[in-house]
Image (tube, coloured by chain):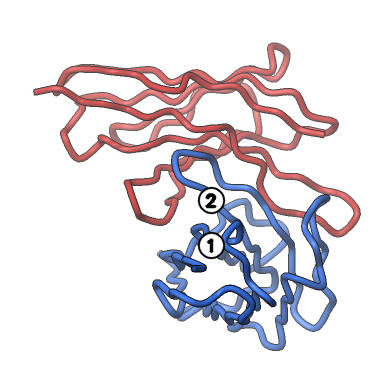
Amino acid sequence: GAVVSQHPSWVICKSGTSVKIECRSLDFQATTMFWYRQFPKQSLMLMATSNEGSKATYEQGVEKDKFLINHASLTLSTLTVTSAHPEDSSFYICSGRNSPSEETQYFGPGTRLLVL
Amino acid sequence: GQSLEQPSEVTAVEGAIVQINCTYQTSGFYGLSWYQQHDGGAPTFLSYNALDGLEETGRFSSFLSRSDSYGYLLLQELQMKDSASYFCAVRDRGGGADGLTFGKGTHLIIQP
């Protein structure tokens, strides 16, 4: 199956700093990438949809100026959490899909963010 | 909007069969997916139903009834490694958003 990697796998930062998370599709071209957030014991919540070369589409309630998404190539998308606060501590998971007609999304291993 | 309902927890015995139900309400429906997630891990795709009926993939099967807005995941010959959370999901299409809306997940506990 298709493989998606994320880096870093976990990060601890101070409140007010920015954190960048990378998501890479290793063996396929992801025309669309998605970013999800998952709090403990809860479901995955879609944050944004990102098409290569286009601006991301954010879900309602997700601040686009706080969660900056860049999808500059078919194999790389980045999520930058700007001015992170303790309430941003969560498990961030990306996924990729290689065509709009395909239903399967391939998920990365996730990044655990802890903001102190 | 979209909403999906599934039981929060199901317990079963190793070697048995278990069914995890999912009902959904969506503004537009294209199909129902199922994902498995082990603690601390990434979700992995299990199955997808766009049409009514049963789809079988090894020990896992998934069923869909569009008229009832209902589906289920059936796991047979349960193994301890099947202990995980299982999510049903629908695809959200429109306005540039195209990700998945997940149910809250069913935690499957398997006892020896």
- N-terminal of the pair, mark 1 or mark 2, is 2
Which residue bears the numbered disc 2? A38
- Which residue reaches farthest right? B95
* Contact, mark 1 vs mark 2 (Cβ under 8 Å): yes
Residue A33 on image: x %, y %: 65, 68
Bin the neighbour count of mark 2 within 10 Å (Cα to Cα): few under 14, some 14-19, many 20 and up.
Answer: some
Bin the neighbour count of mark 1 within 10 Å (Cα to Cα): few under 14, some 14-19, many 20 and up.
Answer: many
B69 left or right of B79? right
Placement of A91 over or under B84, stated as above or below: below
Which residue bears the numbered disc 1? A92
- Which residue reaches farthest left? B112
Placement of A25 over or under B47, stated as above or below: below
Q: On what subunit does the disc labeled 2 rest?
A: A
Q: Which chain is blue?
A: A
Q: In the image, which disc is placed on residue A56? A: none
Query: Could you say whether the residue bearing mark 2 is in a helix, strand or loop?
Result: strand
What amino acid is at disc 1?
A: Tyr
Q: Quadrant of residue A8?
A: bottom left
Q: Quadrant of residue A69?
A: bottom right
